[in-house]
Image: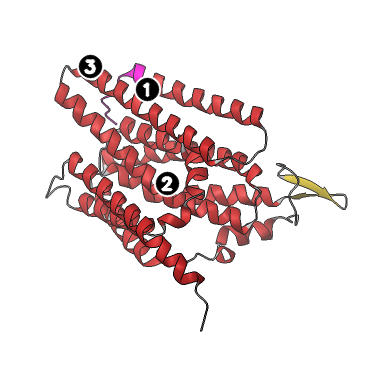
Amino acid sequence: MNTIAPDWLWAFFIASVLLALFVDFVVLRKQGAHAVSVKEALNWSLVWVGLSLAFNALFWWAVKDATGDVAQANARSMEFLTGYLIEKSLAVDNIFVFLMIFTYFSVPPAYQKRVLMIGIIGAIVLRTVMILVGGWLVSEFHWVLYVFGAFLLMTGVKMWFASGKEPDLEDNPALKLLRRMMPVSDRFDGERFFTVQRGKRIATPLLMVVALVGFTDVIFAVDSIPAIFAITTDPFIVLSSNIFAILGLRAMFFLLAAVAAKFHLLSYGLAVILAFIGTKMLLIDVVKIPVLVSLGVVVAVLAITMVWSVRTAPKLRAHESSPQR
């Protein structure tokens, strides 16, 4: 797998991710179990976005220094930014599923941070493996891009028709399997995953939540990773933009959880984005859609759906609160 990133940038990227996770764990441990406020979530979200943009600036400089070509550096950094934005936007749908899981199990807000942190680490490991395998497949078998494209197009269409419908967690196969495999307590025991009832060690609902979050990570990784291969096949850009998008997932969850009702149409926008990316991959050998155009489409679709969601949300609430006749 060919990459434009120098070895020292790979080392810096890996060290940065490990350091970020370490700092996040230290902060999490010092704060203890507590509900995250919107202000705290917003501040951390801005920090993660700022770090991602700073890394992209360093990447631009590294490419320029290695190639001496400013145009090449601009193109590669634009690929990182587009991939980052795509993964960030697709993570929104992931967050809404997390919110549904937490609501279903009535997870106290103070315990949600630890679950999300574990989910982020699992997602990083999982996506690293999947991206490296996917990068190898793309480099060895060009036709895999057509498979990815068809899959994303079908996923986008399926997401469009599923938008607005409340998923039924009771029908989740992972949840059914977990309940058959182990007895589960009917109450939480702090942040513990296991507790003792009547002298028997059994799982707490928090362990079920972690398992379902991990299962959700797998499902969404299958959707999101092929999407970024439509932007670039450079494994460094694919991996780094994906991981930086994931690092801010915990803060973004608490931020969006407070305003989830206002963005009720966002899933339609994500469906359009997936369909667009899938179509781009299917036409990759016929029409070369510039990265800047892809970035513009993603930004425009997100902006339109978010603005339209905010404009229509009050009308929906007023309608829903009207008395039945």
Check if residue 5 falls in the magenta segment.
yes
Q: Residue at x 73, y 55 (%)?
A: 184
Q: Nearer the viewer, residue 247 or 286?
A: 247
In primary-sequence order, the first of circles 3 and 2 is 3
Label 3 packing within 10 angstroms: few (<14), some (14-19), many (20+): few
Contact (CB < 8 A) between labels 1 and 3?
Answer: no
In primary-sequence order, the first of circles 1 and 3 is 1
Determine the residue located farthest toward the bottom in the rendered image: 325
Look at label 3 and name its amino acid.
Ala
**Does residue 317 appear anywhere in the picture?**
yes
Estimate the spatial distance between the alpha carbons at disc 1 and disc 2, rounded to whole Å.
24 Å
SS label for mark 1: helix
Q: Which residue is mark 3?
A: 66
Q: Which residue is mark 1?
A: 10
Structure colour scheme = secondary structure
Quarter the N terminus occupies: top left
Q: Is residue 224 above or below residue 76?
A: below
In primary-sequence order, the first of circles 1 and 2 is 1
Determine the residue located farthest toward the right in the rendered image: 199
Look at label 1 and name its amino acid.
Trp
User: Is residue 82 left or right of 39 when viewed as pictured?
Assistant: left
Q: Nearer the viewer, residue 279 or 206?
A: 206
The secondary structure that dominates the magenta segment is: loop
- Where residue 301 sits in the image (x, y, percent)? 27, 52
- Where residue 208 sits in the image (x, y, percent)? 64, 52
**Does residue 165 appear anywhere in the picture?**
no
For residue 91, which numbered disc appears in the image?
A: 2
SS label for mark 2: helix
SS label for mark 3: helix
Q: Residue at x 37, y 62 (%)?
A: 312
User: Is residue 233 left or right of 181 when viewed as pictured?
Assistant: left
Range shown magenta:
1-9
